[in-house]
Image (cartoon, helix red, strand yellow):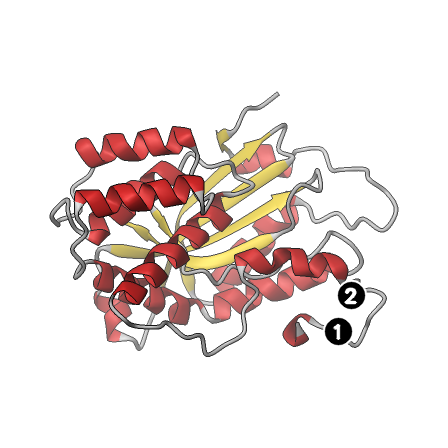
Amino acid sequence: MLRVGETTKEYLINAPLPTHGGRYTVVSHRDVIDNTIKMLTDSGFTIERELYKSCLDAKVAQGVYHIKPTTTSDPTIANETELGMMFAWTNSYDKSKRFQCAIGGYVAVCSNGMLCGEVNYARKHTGTADQEIKMQISSQIKNAEKHFREVIDAKNYLRTVRLSKDEQAEYLGRMLITEDIIKSTQLNEIVREMKEPSYDYKCDQENAWAFYNHVTHGLKSAHPRSWISDTAKFHKFITADLLANMGIQKSDTTKEIAVDEFAYLDDIDLDRNPNITLSTL
């Protein structure tokens, strides 16, 4: 039995498919990988690195792709050197997690992930889930530069914020106890990073960007089932709280399926309600 950790593409595509029967629609890791790679390359992205994790005999799998647009008309993206663009997905065979995917960024020096909260697509593996998953992967890729620009803007903002050690400690307590973003083992790793950073983030240790990276470094050990959700939840929590402390209210201009709204889809049977689509939720 394979424990949680890094694995290979070959291991995932050769993993036995589930046999749940009934209305369950198998969305294979192979299909997710093949469709993701094809859609990225067809859309003009170069895949610079592929990273895969799995657990429990590949019953839960995660894919992360470091990507780069062949061309871009956005000078901010063209000139960005500290962050790279990232596409990530999570898929399961044991019904423990619905398919998820998101565009975000990664920190070049350490590969820490950044997801700005727009974690899209969550439905049970039933009916036409396999086809709709392809549509959602395509939709995310189509909006890749928009999402990546948001990640760059967040990074630049965090670099301007001073965060004392006491404030960092308070955030860690809230993330562990009340927000349920990190686990105790991750807390220990984050504290070690705060005392002796593994990487140079080119900023003072009492800077929000340094703290952000210490946390995302600790989140690397998250279960593949929860890494996307945890990373996006942390980003939303820290940026919204910092903005609120400055008297700024962050407003959304688009309706997205947020991490904490996934349970809402449990009560909707898209197969029995053909007039309901993801765009109307």
Identify which residue is drawn at 75% across, 47% down: 26
Q: Where is residue 51 in the image (x, y as percent from the top left)?
A: 44, 41
Q: Determine if residue 111 is in view.
A: no
Identify which amino acid the numbered label 2 is placed on: Leu
Identify which residue is drawn at 82% across, 70% down: 273
Q: How crowded is mark 1: few (under 14 residues within 10 Å), some or many (20 or more)?
A: few
Q: Determine if residue 113 is in view.
A: yes
Marks 2 & 1, CB-CB < 8 Å contact:
yes
Instruction: For mark 2, give the secondary structure.
Output: loop
Q: In which quarter of the image is residue 69?
A: bottom left
Q: Which of 139 and 175 is in front in this view?
A: 175
Q: In which quarter of the image is residue 185?
A: top left
Q: Looking at the picture, does residue 255 appear above or below residue 191?
A: below
Q: Residues within 10 Å of mark 2 (few under 14, many from 20)?
A: some
Residue at the extreme top of the image, as rendered: 1
Mark 2 lies on residue = 270
Instruction: For mark 1, give the secondary structure.
Output: loop
Q: Nearer the viewer, residue 207 or 54?
A: 207
Q: Which of marks 2 and 1 is nearer the N terminus?
A: 2
Identify which residue is drawn at 64% across, 45% down: 97
Q: Looking at the picture, does residue 194 appear above or below residue 34?
A: above
Identify which residue is drawn at 11% across, 47% down: 204
- Residue 157 lies left or right of residue 120; in this view the side is left
Q: Is the N terminus in the top left, top right, bottom left or bottom right quadrant?
A: top right
Q: Is the C terminus in the top left, top right, bottom left or bottom right quadrant?
A: bottom right
Q: Nearer the viewer, residue 72 or 277?
A: 277
Identify which amino acid the numbered label 1 is placed on: Ile
The Cα–Cα distance between marks 2 and 1, rounded to whole angstroms, is 6 Å
Mark 1 lies on residue = 276
Q: Position of residue 17 (x, y in %)?
A: 73, 37
